[in-house]
Image (tube, coloured by chain):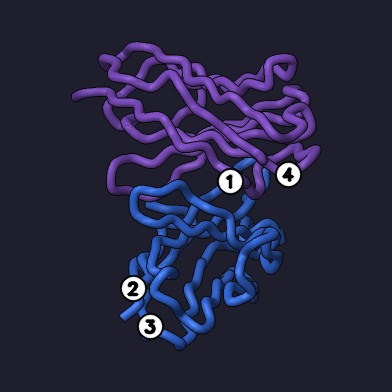
Amino acid sequence: QSALTQPPSASGSPGQSVTISCTGTSGDVGAYNHVSWYQQHPGKVPKLIIYEVTKRPSGISDRFSGSKSGNTASLTVSGLQAEDEADYYCTSYAGSNNLFFGGGTKLTVL
Amino acid sequence: QEHLVESGGGVVQPGGSLRLSCAASGFTFSSHGMTWVRQAPGKGLEWVAFIRFDGANQYYGDSVEGRFTISRDNSKNTLYLQMNSLRPEDTAVYYCAKGDIWSGYPSWFDPWGQGTLVTVPS
């Protein structure tokens, strides 16, 4: 059982926007601005796409954006493209030098 | 270009030990916290361990605490994971990843290595 809860799947048509949620508690997501998101294509290495809730690493498309409200963080993918089809994982620092991952969300581009 | 290369994976019997290595290049290794994350076949990501940039502190996920030890040699730009008392549920691809500069606790990681597969048959 994952400490952070993500929907197992999400989908959208090309050009649409999709939002993936990541629900934690007041001890992790709600307490710290250390939420990050990773994209993993099948058979590939995870890639950081959002860190510290809203920041994008260099080279990451601005179609990816992050936000947080209370104990829930969200990743929004705008202008969906076929290449966005992948698994997405959230993480949050949880205090006491602990880190939680979400269970992952499989994004399908219809 | 920042680069991480893991090695040392393989098949080990339950109760056995294995040491993974992660060779880093393209960045100032001694300035960054480092982590190990694993992924069981067909499953999600699980944080395993983190070590501070200077090696002064190490932190572990609950499932490996007391069995695994993370360490680093900043003179060799290399990260290690010593895995003891291995169990079938430790079977996974193990990734090393670079943390934030001067980081003292696990947060975000970029980039990740290609991973090395550890198999513990049941």
**Between A71 and A38, which is closer to the camera in this rendering?**
A38
Residue hosting label 3: A12
User: Residue shown at 65%/61% (left/top)?
Assistant: A59
Chain given the colour blue: A
Residue at mark 3 shares a chain with residue at mark 1 = yes
The tag on residue A76 is none
**Circle 1 or circle 2, nearest the eye:** 2
Q: Which of marks 3 and 2 is nearer the N terminus?
A: 3
| Three-letter amino acid code of the residue under disc 3 | Gly
Chain B on-screen colour: purple
Image height of A85 relative to B31, above or below: below
Image height of B29 relative to B37, above or below: above
Can residue B52 be seen at all in this image of the molecule? yes
Q: Which of marks 3 and 1 is nearer the N terminus?
A: 3
Discs 3, 2 touching: Cβ within 8 Å: no
Q: Is mark 4 on a helix, strand or loop?
A: strand
Whole-number angstrom distance, CA of label 4 to CA of label 2: 31 Å
